[in-house]
Image (cartoon, rainbow, N blue to C red):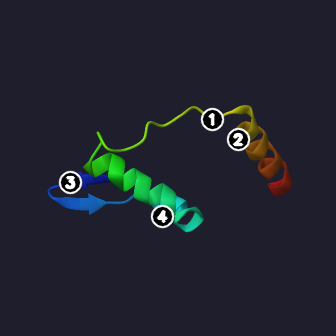
Amino acid sequence: MRIHKGHLLHSASDLANFLDCEHLTALDLLALLHPEAAPARTADGDEAQLGREIAGNRAE
C-alpha cells in the first residue's frame, strides 16, 4: 500500500491481506498515514513459522 500523486494504491498482497484480515489492512493504512500512531511490528515467533510450515504442507 502506498500513496502516489495523492491516490492510495493497493498491491495484490494488500487485497489478499484484506480478505484474510481486515484488521491487518487497518493497521497497514494507519502505518502509512500516521506512522507515529501505528504499533510497532514484531518479528514472527516460532508459532507463526510453524503455522506457515503446516499450511504449506497441507497445500502440497
**Residue 25 at x, y percent in the picture:** 45, 59
Mark 3–mark 2 distance (CA, rounded to whole Å): 33 Å
Tell me if label 1 and label 4 are in contact, CB under 8 Å: no
**Residue 21 at x, y percent in the picture:** 56, 62
Say which residue appears at 42% left-offset and 59% top-offset.
Answer: 26
Q: Which mark is residue 4?
A: 3
Foreground tag (1 vs 4):
1
Q: Which of marks 2 and 3 precedes in the sequence?
A: 3
Q: Is residue 3 above or below residue 19?
A: above
Which one is nearer the viewer's eye here, 55 or 36? Answer: 36
Q: Is residue 52 left or right of residue 54?
A: left
**Residue 14 at x, y percent in the picture:** 46, 58
Local packing at callout 3 (Cα closer than 10 Å; few below 14, some 14-19, many 20+) is few
Q: Is residue 56 above or below residue 16?
A: above
Mark 1–mark 3 distance (CA, rounded to whole Å): 30 Å
Say which residue appears at 15% left-offset and 58% top-offset.
Answer: 6
Mark 4: amino acid: Leu
Q: Which residue is mark 1?
A: 44
Q: Which residue is mark 4?
A: 15
Mark 2: amino acid: Ala
* SS of the residue under disc 2: helix
Say which residue appears at 77% left-offset and 45% top-offset.
Answer: 51
Local packing at callout 1 (Cα closer than 10 Å; few below 14, some 14-19, many 20+) is few
Q: Which residue is mark 2?
A: 48
Mark 1–mark 4 distance (CA, rounded to whole Å): 21 Å
Q: Which of marks 4 and 3 precedes in the sequence?
A: 3
Mark 3–mark 4 distance (CA, rounded to whole Å): 17 Å
Foreground tag (2 vs 4):
2
